[in-house]
Amino acid sequence: MMDRTTSKASLVSPTGPLVRFAILACLAYLGFYVYGLVMGVFSPGEMVGFSSIAAGILITCGVYAMFLRREPVESEERRKMLHDLHEQQRRRGF
């Protein structure tokens, strides 16, 4: 349940709780996949489906990691603080 201070944008931000849950779910699936490979649980027909899902998850994680490296997330508080700092410097003549 969302309280009044939680916005929808913060839930799906790159570090929001829904993204964290999705990452944990992906890691759980990959753990199940590796366990199944080691134990020999999958038949050859199942291997195609499970391997394609695992490959998709790994590609998505790679793209997400590149996104995080290129786009640092700034919180609203930090933006407001920097804006206030620039305003103070402008008034003092810096």
Image: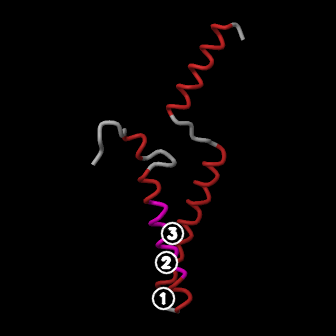
Sequence order check: which comes first, mark 1 or mark 2? 1
Image height of 17 relative to 25, above or below: above
**Judging from the image, what secondary structure is the residue with disc 3 in?**
helix
- 3 or 1: tag closer to the N-terminus: 3
> Disc 1 marks which amino acid?
Phe
- Residue hosting label 2: 50
Which residue is at a point 61% across and 13% down the rendered structure image? 88
Nearer the observer: mark 3 or 2; the answer is 3
Residue visible at 34% across and 36% down in the picture? 5
Rounded to the nearest whole Å, what is the CA distance between mark 1 and mark 2? 9 Å
- Tell me, yes or no, whether the two marked residues, 1 and 2, touch with CB atoms within 8 Å: yes
The amino acid at mark 3 is Leu
Residue at the spot of label 1: 42
Gap in angstroms between the C-alphas marked 3 and 2: 14 Å
The residue closer to the viewer here, 29 or 5, is 5
Above or below: residue 17 compared with residue 79? below
Q: Which residues are magenta?
A: 22-34
Q: Residue at x 56, y 19 (%)?
A: 84
> Where is 28 relative to 59, above or below?
below
Are dots 3 and 1 in contact, CB under 8 Å? no
Under tag 1, what secondary structure? loop
- Residue type at numbered disc 2: Phe
Q: Give the position of the C terminus as an image quadrant.
A: top right
Could you say which is closer to the camera, residue 22 or residue 63? 22
Query: Of helix, strand and loop, which one carries label 2?
Result: helix
Q: Nearer the viewer, mark 3 or mark 1?
A: 3
Residue behind mark 3: 27
